[in-house]
């Protein structure tokens, strides 16, 4: 007999029994996508063979959303392969709340094909086609995927340290996925698909917003990854094993340097009236190091950059808006004194002397610099802040005096053709490393705070990312191979009963795919050094 602890109750069941059978009579069973059982994530078909504690994983949780999207991706891949057996599918990168996919087929993909794929997906969903899972020794899985011509799967699994791997099957289409699936396609109640830029946009949602600038940056780095033969983890690991770590670092850093030079040249030679460079990006995008390095490039071109933090324009704490929980909402636009910001900027632009504010975070009060600042002819202000791209922030500054830059770690690196690594994972891993180095935080503290960070990014940064002069990618092809050595030990410290354990364990498994890189190869001026605690810039 099994004793299952669930929501404060003890259920007694015959053994073995599946998770599906345990939750069968619950009214909310259709919203349960998985469970945590004795600290491990289990799918609904998992057979319980020992007593333990069960925690339900619902559709609206972050884990639930990933399970839904992963199942949707398999439905898409299966539909394509059933319609076009000789085609190759590549799930490339994020776009407008979904994912951009390429389908290599003869003749080339067209709108009619996309309509067929959508129809076939809906047929599979309506039939509630079953997804079967087989757990086999990893060596056997590698041989299996090599045997059916899926070398990218075999190469990925060959890097796994786990003794066993899962093979998923849908309509006789076999695949490997990083994470569990729903038991059948009938769970997929909503999805959107459309023809976009000779490929396909696929999303669990319905709203599409054209993000041409972001798309172009992603595509540029996809092509660059192919050119240097580092498009996925297996290729990265092979390069590290062959002793090419220094070369990988040099290529990544040279690419960043080249792009920085291009941005500086664009500002100086093509936007000569620029007096304000407004920089914004999500957490751990590398804004501080980017700003410092851009300053150096501007100095080379004869400019005198003057850094200003938008945080210094906070209202006094007593005047800040309040959140429902009673805490101050420092991320809200209303927390900034926009009138003061615009007044100061206009005076600087007109070469009037002005005292700059300094916000004292200990007292929560505004203070002032002792000496007035006067902007001379060759000076350019570099202003960094979460609201830098919001048009309300600098509403009174002439458009031709502003140059807006959005930066993010827009990785092209994926596990393989069917398993994407979200850019948010890169940033969270960076953040865990930096919080540990600079604040002494443990991993669970950073992870627990991450949802609030992401929510504010959705509200205050992403809506304006296309309204920029430039989008800058700060990701490095090699970075997770180095960050893993800092972050995995921190993830190991998260206890099994902690609410952040599920996410911590997922990130740990992701990082375990990477070969160890040599951090000594990373220059102190690198954006990555900001997260290793070795930067020559003041990034504390």
Image: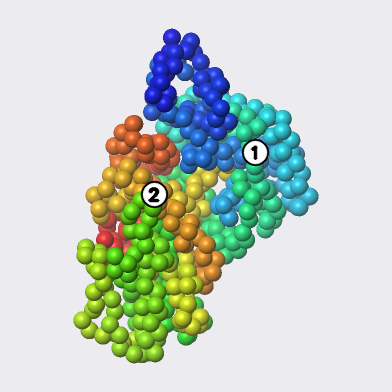
Q: Residue at x 51, y 80 (%)?
A: 399
* In the displayed structure image, the side of residue 304 where residue 54 appears, left or right: right
In the foreground, 476 or 445: 445
Q: Residue at x 41, y 15 (%)?
A: 3
The residue carrying pointer 2 sits among few (fewer than 14), some (14 to 19) or many (20 or more) residues within 10 Å by Cα, namely: some
Q: Residue at x 33, y 75 (%)?
A: 307
* In the displayed structure image, the side of residue 105 where residue 298 appears, left or right: left
In the foreground, 318 or 136: 318
Dot 1 falls on a residue whose secondary structure is loop
Dot 2 falls on a residue whose secondary structure is helix
Residue extending farthest right: 112
In the rendered image, the quadrant that contains the N terminus is top left
Specify which label sits upstream in the sequence, 2 or 1.
Answer: 1
The residue carrying pointer 1 sits among few (fewer than 14), some (14 to 19) or many (20 or more) residues within 10 Å by Cα, namely: few
Q: Position of residue 287 (x, y in %)?
A: 38, 64
In the rendered image, the quadrant that contains the C terminus is bottom left
Q: Position of residue 148 (x, y in %)?
A: 63, 31
Q: Residue at x 42, y 23 (%)?
A: 6
| Rendering quarter of residue 350 | bottom left
Residue 43 visible, this angle: yes
**Colour mapping:** rainbow
| Rendering quarter of residue 500 | top left
Q: Position of residue 159 (x, y in %)?
A: 45, 36
Mark 2–mark 1 contact, CB under 8 Å?
Answer: no
* In the displayed structure image, the side of residue 278 where residue 31 appears, left or right: right
| Rendering quarter of residue 260 | bottom left
Q: Is residue 358 above or below residue 229?
A: below
In the foreground, 407 or 478: 407
Residue 150 visible, this angle: no
Q: CA distance from mark 2 to mark 1?
A: 28 Å
| Mark seen at residue 450 | 2
| Mark seen at residue 189 | 1
């Amino acid at each position: 007999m099994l004793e299952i602890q669930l929501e404060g109750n003890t259920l007694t069941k015959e053994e073995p029994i599946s998770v599906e059978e345990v939750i069968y009579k619950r009214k909310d069973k259709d919203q349960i996508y998985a469970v945590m059982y004795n600290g491990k994530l289990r799918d609904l078909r998992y057979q319980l063979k020992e007593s333990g504690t069960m925690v339900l994983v619902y559709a609206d949780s972050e884990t639930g959303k990933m399970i839904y999207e992963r199942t949707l991706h398999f439905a898409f891949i299966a539909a394509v392969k059933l319609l076009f057996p000789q085609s190759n599918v590549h799930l490339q990168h994020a776009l407008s709340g979904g994912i951009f996919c390429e389908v290599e087929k003869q003749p080339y993909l067209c709108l009619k094909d996309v309509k067929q794929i959508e129809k076939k997906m809906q047929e599979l969903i309506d039939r509630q086609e079953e997804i079967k899972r087989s757990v086999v020794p990893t060596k056997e899985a590698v041989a299996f995927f090599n045997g059916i011509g899926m070398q990218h799967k075999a190469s990925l699994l060959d890097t796994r340290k786990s003794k066993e791997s899962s093979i998923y099957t849908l309509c006789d289409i076999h695949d490997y996925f990083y994470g569990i699936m729903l038991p059948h396609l009938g769970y997929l109640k909503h999805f959107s698909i459309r023809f976009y830029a000779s490929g396909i946009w696929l999303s669990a949602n319905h709203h599409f917003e054209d993000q041409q600038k972001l798309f172009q940056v992603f595509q540029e780095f996809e092509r660059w990854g192919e050119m240097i033969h580092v498009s996925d983890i297996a290729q990265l690991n092979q390069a590290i094993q062959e002793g090419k770590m220094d070369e990988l670092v040099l290529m990544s850093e040279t690419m960043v340097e080249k792009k920085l030079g291009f941005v500086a040249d664009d500002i100086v030679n093509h936007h000569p009236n620029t007096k304000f460079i407004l920089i914004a990006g999500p957490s751990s995008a590398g804004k501080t190091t980017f700003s410092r390095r851009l300053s150096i490039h501007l100095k080379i071109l004869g400019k005198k950059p003057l850094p200003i933090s938008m945080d210094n324009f906070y209202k006094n704490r007593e005047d800040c808006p309040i959140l429902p929980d009673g805490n101050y909402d420092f991320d809200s636009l209303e927390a900034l004194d926009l009138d003061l910001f615009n007044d100061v900027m206009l005076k600087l632009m007109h070469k009037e002397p002005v005292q700059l504010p300094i916000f004292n975070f200990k007292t929560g009060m505004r203070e002032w610099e002792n000496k007035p600042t006067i902007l001379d002819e060759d000076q350019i202000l570099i202003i960094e802040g979460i609201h830098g791209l919001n048009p309300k922030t600098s509403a009174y500054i002439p458009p031709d005096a502003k140059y807006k830059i959005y930066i993010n770690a827009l990785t092209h690196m994926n596990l393989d053709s069917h398993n994407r690594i979200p850019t948010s994972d890169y940033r969270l891993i960076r953040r865990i490393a930096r919080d540990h180095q600079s604040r002494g935080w443990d991993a669970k503290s950073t992870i627990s705070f991450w949802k609030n960070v992401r929510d504010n990014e959705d509200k205050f940064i992403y809506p304006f990312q296309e309204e920029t002069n430039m989008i800058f990618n700060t990701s490095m092809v090699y970075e997770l191979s180095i960050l893993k050595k800092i972050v995995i030990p921190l993830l190991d410290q998260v206890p099994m009963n902690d609410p952040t354990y599920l996410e911590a364990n997922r990130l740990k498994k992701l990082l375990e795919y990477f070969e160890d890189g040599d951090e000594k190869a990373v220059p102190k001026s690198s954006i990555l050094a900001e997260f290793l605690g070795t930067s020559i810039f003041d990034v504390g």
